[in-house]
Image (cartoon, grey):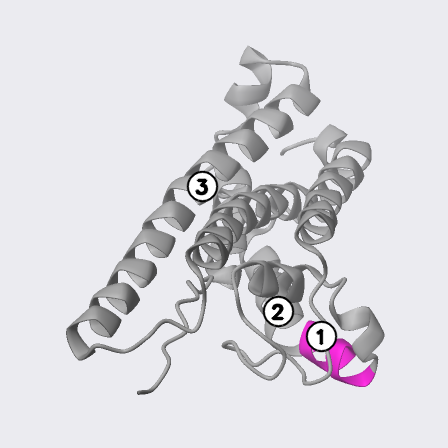
Amino acid sequence: MAAVAVMPGSGKHRLQLLGVVIASGEFRLKTATDTYLDQPDRSRVLAAKAIAAAAAGTVLGAAAAATATGIALGFAASRGYPLALPGPAIAGYAGGTVIGSALLAAAGAGTGSLIRQQTSAIVAVVAWGLVIELVVGATVTALGRFLPYTAAAMLAGDTSGGGMPQIPRGVIALPYPAAIAVLAAVAVALAAVAALTTVGRDVT
């Protein structure tokens, strides 16, 4: 009998792009001025956007994990295949999908606040995920697991040489808490840089 691994995937780029749209949309739609007049503390506005993005990411991540896991378990049961992973591991990867989705969406909010021009922010996110991170990870495999998309993908159950886009071979997954810490640090760093630079600038 073939073994079926149940590992919910993660729409990494889409989750960060969600945060980008949430944060940069006000600049594109010219509503940022009204928001800042209503709430002059721009750091609070940025924090609120990051929280909103994280909440949306949590919902989408939970839906993705439930759907992927449900389909895989249903397929395995219908064919009589044994599972390659125990229940706790499946639950851990599902939880990793939810946590990774929330933190990547929050990181997207920081990116969208740092790069106000929405198209430029989207291009930057896609270029990082599809080109820069893959090249760096493949070139310096010891560094690869500390990169945000790779950490999020492995937190959700992708393995070295797997995933979409493919994680470079030779990259070793971080321990669960460390992967979460990496993603949280990226989200906080992007928000902090945005708060110190672009958030305080004129919106016109």
Earlier residue among tags 3 and 1: 3
Which residue is painted at 73% across and 45% down in the image? 181
For the residues labelled 2 and 1, say whether their Cβ atoms are less than 8 Å apart.
yes
Front residue of this view, candidates 182 and 200: 182
29 versus 119 height, above or below: above
Magenta highlight range? 132-139
Residue that numbered label 1 is attached to: 132
Residue 77 is left or right of residue 124, and the answer is left
Mark 1: give few (<14), some (14-19) or many (20+) Cα within 10 Å: some
Q: As displayed, is residue 68 above or below residue 45?
A: below
User: Dot 2: what SS?
Assistant: helix
Along the line of sight, which residue is nearer the eye, 29 or 171? 171
Q: Which residue is drawn at 44% across and 53% down?
A: 94
Crowd tier of the residue under label 3, counting other residues whose Cα lies within 10 Å: few below 14, some 14–19, many 20 or above: many
The amino acid on which the numbered mark 2 sits, given as a three-letter code, is Gly
What is the spatial separation of the Cα atoms under label 2 and label 1, in whole angstroms?
A: 6 Å
Residue 133 lies in the magenta stretch = yes
Q: Which of marks 3 and 1 is in front?
A: 3
Q: Name the residue under label 3.
A: 58
Query: How far is disc 3 from disc 1 in space, using C-alphas?
Result: 26 Å
Checking the image for residue 109, the label placed there is: none
Quarter residue 110 falls in? top right
Image quadrant for the C terminus?
Answer: top right
**Horizontal arrangement in the rendering, residue 196 relative to residue 115 (left or right):** right
C-alpha distance separating marks 2 and 3: 20 Å
Say whether residue 78 is left or right of residue 5.
Answer: left
Secondary structure mostly seen in magenta is helix
Query: Which is more N-terminal, label 3 or label 2?
Result: 3
State whether residue 20 is above or below residue 38.
below
Residue topped by disc 2 = 129
Could you tell me the amino acid type at mark 1? Ile
